[in-house]
Image: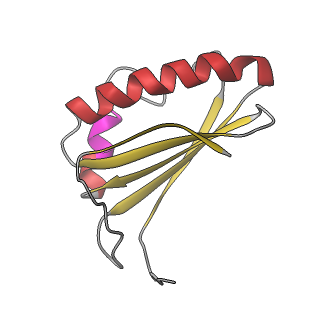
Amino acid sequence: MEVSASRSLLADVEIVEGDRITHVAEFRMIPSNQPEMVKRTTAELERAMNNSPGLISATFHRSLDGTRMFNYGQWESKEAFEAILQQPGFNPARPYGEGLARNEFHLYNVVHVASA
């Protein structure tokens, strides 16, 4: 996987057990759609970071075979994440990737952190 876009509001985002909400999304697509999906996710990342209180960081990765993209985001709370779903383009009924990719996402709590 290759990072296609990443942005954080904090200089150093530390992942802590039981703190924050982690959002992981998988976008599945045909390889010819991936370049346009990279463009859209890059543009929407800027909009999300500027208009979504509680969004700490987001990183998009694209698969080398062109069939997937993953988004990993850190949020201050579940409520902050749910608020973005009301914004145009982020609403699951009319997502910014419509016509290019299928998106499935889940929310997680960090339960263990280990450092090397």
Q: Nearer the viewer, residue 103 or 63?
A: 63
**78 vs 99: above or below:** below
Q: Is 28 left or right of 46, judged from the image as shown?
A: right
Q: Residue at x 41, y 70 (%)?
A: 109
Task: Kindly tell me whether residue 96 is visible in this rendering.
Answer: no
x, y percentage for residue 6? 43, 40
Please name the colour scheme applied to the rendered image: secondary structure
Is 84 inside the magenta-drawn segment?
A: yes
Q: Position of residue 15 (x, y in %)?
A: 36, 70
Q: Is residue 107 above or below residue 105?
A: below
Is residue 19 among what the camera can see?
A: yes
Q: Which residues are magenta?
A: 81-86
Q: Is residue 18 magenta?
A: no
Residue 8, position as x, y percentages in the image: 31, 46
| Residue 56 placement, left or right of 112 | left
Residue 84: percent from left, percent from top: 31, 36
Q: Residue at x 26, y 40 (%)?
A: 83
Q: Main secondary structure of the magenta part?
A: helix
Residue appearing at x 34%, y 48% in the figure: 57
Q: Looking at the rendering, which quadrant does residue 11 occupy?
A: bottom left
Foreground residue, 68 or 93? 68
Which residue is painted at 65% across and 19% down in the image? Answer: 35
Please give the count of numbered marks on the rendered protein. Answer: 0
